[in-house]
Image (cartoon, rainbow, N blue to C red):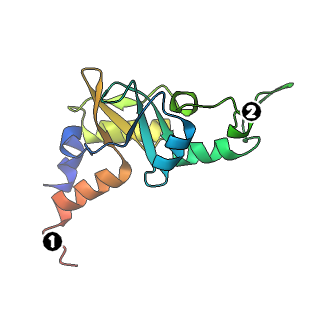
Amino acid sequence: MSELRFGDVAVSEVMNTELPVIEKGAGVCQVARMLRRASHLWVVEERGSRVVLGIVTVHQFMDLLSPIPEGEYATGVIKPRSLYLGQLRTAEEVMSRPVVSCGPATKVEEALELLRERDIRRLAVVEGGEIVGELSPKGVIAAYYIASCGMRDSS
């Protein structure tokens, strides 16, 4: 595959389909347990569901572990979100939303632009209202390498 044509490849050709998911009602201890091995979790409606509601990342969870996370202040009012305050009990309460997504037919170039514009590391690939994959910079780099460099690089 030509390097110049890689951006025209459909996201479905390079997306990861093995997704770390957790249901919205799962407790924060289950979220923490799963985040020990995953960099993020897609929050879905219920067990077995693929209807994605949000995402929890390791970075975001670490912010919630701080007694008073940075950037949670409004003029005259302090409204910190912290696990120490006890108000966050489920995956749904700690997740970020809305989920930024694209469809499987979206071109890689367009998907990468979404990642850059939104300053995110994961893009949900959604079809028929359900998550079918995800796109990450590492996944795109791996797919590029396999498609464009693998046969030329012997190291």
Q: Which residue is mark 1?
A: 152
Q: Which mark, by number, is residue 80?
A: 2
Residue at 35%, 34% in the rendered image: 124
Q: Quadrant of the C terminus?
A: bottom left
CA gap, disc 2 to disc 1? Answer: 52 Å
Q: How many neighbours does mark 1 have within 10 angstroms: few (below 14), some (14-19), or many (20 or more)?
A: few
Which amino acid does the dot numbered 2 rest on? Pro
Residue at 31%, 30% in the rendered image: 102
Which amino acid does the dot numbered 1 rest on? Arg
Element carrying mark 1: loop
Q: Horizontal and vertical percent for residue 73?
A: 77, 31
Residue at 35%, 42% in the rendered image: 112
Q: Horizontal and vertical percent for residue 68?
A: 76, 40
Q: Quadrant of the N terminus?
A: bottom left
Rendered view: 36 above or below 82: below
Q: Determine whether, in the image, residue 145 is placed left or right of residue 80.
A: left
Residue at 76%, 28% in the rendered image: 79
Q: Which mark, by number, is residue 69?
A: none
Q: Are marks 2 and 1 in contact (CB under 8 Å)?
A: no
Q: Horizontal and vertical percent for residue 143?
A: 23, 54
User: Does residue 115 appear anywhere in the picture?
Assistant: yes
Residue farthest toward the bottom in the current orientation of the protein: 155
